[in-house]
Amino acid sequence: MSQQNLERFRNLVLTDPGLQEQLREPGDGDDFLALVLQLGQARGFDFTEADVTAAMQAGRRTWIERWIQ
């Protein structure tokens, strides 16, 4: 369920320029992760730090695989 909430939050971010701007501000990965959790929770989405980390790693892996092939 929490991964579904993360995906819903991600979709919200893709359509909300204000959220996109807020998520551009953090300087490092830990600050970004904390902000994602804070913004998601403030909007009623329940997901964990592990969910966000796994999604980020999957995104990186997908990007790398595109360029290797």
Image: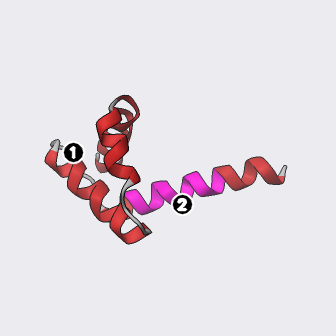
Rendering coords of residue 42 (x, y %): 15, 48
| Residue projecting furthest to the right | 69
Total marks drawn? 2
Helix, strand or loop at disc 2?
helix
The structure residue drawn at horizontal position 30% and vertical position 41%, both measured from the top left corner, is: 19
Categorize mark 1 by other alpha carbons within 10 Å: few (<14), some (14-19), many (20+). Answer: some
Residue in front for this viewpoint, 55 or 36: 36
SS category of the residue bearing label 1: loop
Determine if the magenta segment contains residue 58.
yes
Q: Position of residue 51 (x, y in %)?
A: 37, 58
**Which residue is under mark 1?**
45
Above or below 56: residue 30: below
Quarter containing the N terminus: top left
Is 6 above or below relative to 64?
above
How was this image coloured?
secondary structure
Asked whether residue 69 is in view, the answer is yes
Check disc 2 and report the residue beneath it: 57
- Left or right side of 61 for 14: left
The circle on residue 8 is none
Residue closer to the observer: 7 or 23: 23
Amino acid type at mark 2 = Gln
Going by the numbered disc 1, the residue's amino acid type is Phe
Image x and y of residue 55, in percent? 47, 54
Taking 11 as reference, is 35 left or right? left
Q: Which quadrant holds residue 38?
A: bottom left
Which residue is depicted at the point 35% across and 34% down?
Answer: 17
**Residue 4 visible, this angle:** no
| Residue 15: quarter of image | top left
Q: In the image, residue 13 lies at what x, y percent?
A: 35, 38
Look at the image and give the residue range highlighted in magenta. Answer: 52-62
Nearest to N terminus: mark 2 or mark 1 = 1
Main SS, magenta region, reads helix
